[in-house]
Image (cartoon, rainbow, N blue to C red):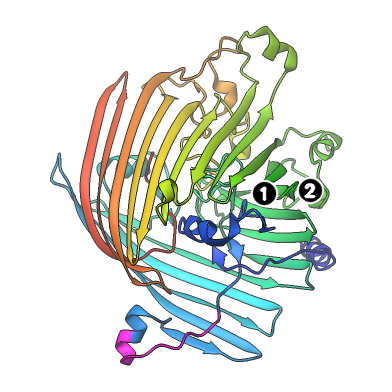
Amino acid sequence: MMNRLFFLLFFLTCSVSYSQEFRHILSRNFHLIEAEDHHKLNHNSHTSFLPLLEKDYNKDTSYGSWFHRKLTKEYFLQIDRNDYALIVNPVINLEIGKERDNNNLIWTNTRGIIADGRLGSRFKFYSSFLENQSVFPRYITNSIVEKSAWVIPGQGESRWSADSVFDYSIASGHFNYRFSKFSMFEFGTGKHFIGDGYRSLILSDVAFNYPYLRVQTNAGMFQYTNLYMEHMNLFSNPSQSYTYDKKYMSLHHLSANITDRLNIGIFESVVWENSRTPEFSGFDISYLNPIIFLRPVEYSLNSSDNVLIGMNLKFKINNSSHIYGQFVLDEYSFPDLQNGDGWWGNKYAYQFGCKWYHAFRIQNLIFQFENNVATPYTYSHSNVNQSYSHYFQSLAHPLGSNFNETLFLIDYKFHQFKAHLQFTNIKFGDKIRNDPHNYGNDIFVSSDERPSDYGVEMYQGNYSVLDYIKTHISYTINPKTNLILQTGMVYRLLENDSGSEETSFIFFGVKSDLFNRYYDY
């Protein structure tokens, strides 16, 4: 194992990669920055691979008392020298709400800290830790407790639960070293997102953090990323001697700015379990190949690992609007596809969306439309240990597959006020109660459990329709730390063959709005 580790580190230090001069951004607030800068026709940036990786160490001159400056204008602690810099900020999320139908009091209490900085001009680091206690709306609580491990969406496993109070923590961190103007190497624990939409069907930040190695190369119009990840399989039963089983993933993504308007990215990924054979355990160095085309490697190993390929694109219509999309191919047979007989193995997903910045010539008004579709059994595998998942959560869309989702989002910023409106409609085929078959939605059930090989249709199983509406208004207390006051409401209605479930609640809170949380499913 140590030999493999030394080989891996040697390979990475010999690789040429690139770090663009951006902030470390994974939050949805990125679209406000994108509207101001990265979207412009003459801006040769690659926005489809997040997080973007630069810190803003410029120290602003501000006035007022220490408390007023730290609360509303500055970082809590900032040291800026020629040869090093450090920023430290507290993180809070104090939120309370109430469900209308059952008078259930819901709340979240988060305390944490973020530290990031640099040593010299080449070495950067980032670290965060959050400690949380929460009472969630009923539909989220049900989705957590129905699994053998109680995993909070995107935030890890709860240590315990008493009276529906979940206690959980999440830590992130990485170090980043820039070898030259072309080179970047990053090692850490965190999340990534590939695409220009609200969702990603390639790799999203829906799931919990994972260890990774990221190597990025930039040359002219091209950006090439190698991402090596270790994921956790929570189907296994840990004991005092063993933890959860592990699996690994290797992903390649090539982004090219074909013109000032058109960006095209192609990707491939492979997922394999920790112990594919009794003789082998660990990261297969065959998948360390930094050059695209993993499928021939898989064939040469005579394996049945889970390989996905696909592409993403973004076309800038003008300086205030663009369209984007993705296509993911899991498995296919052209003869069966042409016959139209519904062969189960024709597995694919696609996305189409558009963004309109400063809509109707109103500054900071953003409209977004998006449609996401995944056919039954996409991302799943005959071996559940090799599904496209981590910590009981999908690495792509939170619903897995066998769905058609339509999203409308409106964002508006006026001085320190922000308003957000989201409408989501999802049609999907869910599991049938007391039926052991996999109808194509649950990627945590073997695809071998399908009821038939042919006649597979969209929404097969328990036909379900989900409507989700969320609106909130916030006031930015400190733009440096994105500390906000927020109030809003959520309405959710799920209807299927088993009946209907209606949920609505209002909420109020003060929070450091730095992380994406996905509860809209």
Task: Judge whether residue 198 can be spotted in this image.
Answer: no
Q: Quadrant of the C terminus?
A: top left
- Taking depth in this image into account, of 463 and 261 the one nearest to the observer is 261
Q: Badge 2, how many Cα within 10 Å: few under 14, some, many 20+?
A: many
Quadrant including the N terminus: bottom right
Image location (x, y in percent) of residue 178: 73, 73
Q: Determine whether 399 is above or below 64 in the image.
A: above
Tell me the magenta residue range.
57-68
Give residue 307's quadrant in the image. Answer: top right
For the point 48% across and 27% down, the residue is: 403
> Which residue is the site of mark 2?
287
Badge 1 vs badge 2, beta-carbon distance below 8 Å? yes
Task: Identify residue type, mark 1.
Answer: Tyr
Q: State left or right for residue 260 relative to residue 103.
A: right
In the image, what residue type sits under mark 2? Tyr
Reply yes or no: does residue 468 show up in magenta.
no
Kindly state the secondary structure of the residue where label 1 is placed.
Answer: strand
* Residue ID for mark 1: 248
Q: Earlier in the sequence, mark 1 or mark 2?
A: 1
Residue at position x 61%, y 45% from top? 316
